[in-house]
Amino acid sequence: MALAGACGTLTGAGVPAAAARRAVATPAPTAPPTPEPTPVATPTPVPPPTAEPTPPPAPAPPPQPAARTFALGGNGTVTVATNGTSATITVAISGLRAIAHAVHLHAGCTGNPGNHVATIGTVGSAGTVSITVPTRLLGNTVIVYPDASATGNPILCAATA
């Protein structure tokens, strides 16, 4: 039998009924779950290199020399090919008298010995001669003499720059 009191209905054990309901409805505290151990990442060993490292690529080949060609009267050409600080002057001649002709590099189109810069070579009625000079000499003139003596006025002149 339940008794009614100032605090509400009592159970047969003398505990208020509301408190008894709370005790039954509230679950008992439980221990916190045991944490699972976190797996530790094992580093994967890197095998040592088995081959030599790739060498750097070979340097690019030097650029081809720049070449310019100038007319040498109606009887030939002067081709100038520069390569860095040097230049190759190639003189190709045809249709001259059938004797030897001196080919020189001069300052200007005169046979003046004071203007002589370099001897390129000697050709016959046709032929090709070349000389390699420092590029600072470009701007001078190729001259062809009327014979091998390298005297008198030139019969052909051409620029080198």
Image (cartoon, rainbow, N blue to C red):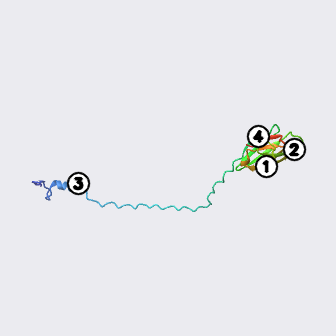
Q: Is tag 1's residue or tag 4's residue first in the polypeptide sequence? A: 4
Q: Is tag 2's residue or tag 1's residue first in the polypeptide sequence? A: 1
- Distance from label 1 to label 4 (Cα)? 19 Å
Q: Amino acid at mark 4?
A: Phe
Decide which of 61, 5 is in the foreground and name it. Answer: 61
* Residue 50's disc number: none
Local secondary structure at mark 1:
strand
* Residue 147's disc number: 2
Q: Amino acid at mark 3?
A: Ala
* Residue 118's disc number: 1
* Residue 70's disc number: 4
Decide which of 7, 71 is in the foreground and name it. Answer: 71
Name the spot of residue 142 as percent of width and height, x first: 79, 44
Name the spot of residue 154 as percent of width and height, x first: 83, 41
Q: Amino acid at mark 2?
A: Asp
- Foreground mark, 4 or 3, reads 4
For image coordinates 76% across by 48% down, the residue present is 88
Instruction: Sort mark 3 into few (<14), some (14-19) or many (20+) by Cα contacts within 10 Å.
Output: few
- Foreground mark, 1 or 3, reads 1
Q: Is tag 1's residue or tag 3's residue first in the polypeptide sequence? A: 3
Which residue is tagged 3?
25
**Is the C-beta separation of discs 2 and 4 under 8 Å?**
no
- Foreground mark, 1 or 4, reads 1
Local secondary structure at mark 3:
helix
Image-quadrant location for residue 147: top right
Q: Is tag 3's residue or tag 2's residue first in the polypeptide sequence? A: 3
Which residue is at the far top? 74
- Distance from label 3 to label 2 (Cα)? 133 Å
For image coordinates 76% across by 50% down, the residue present is 132
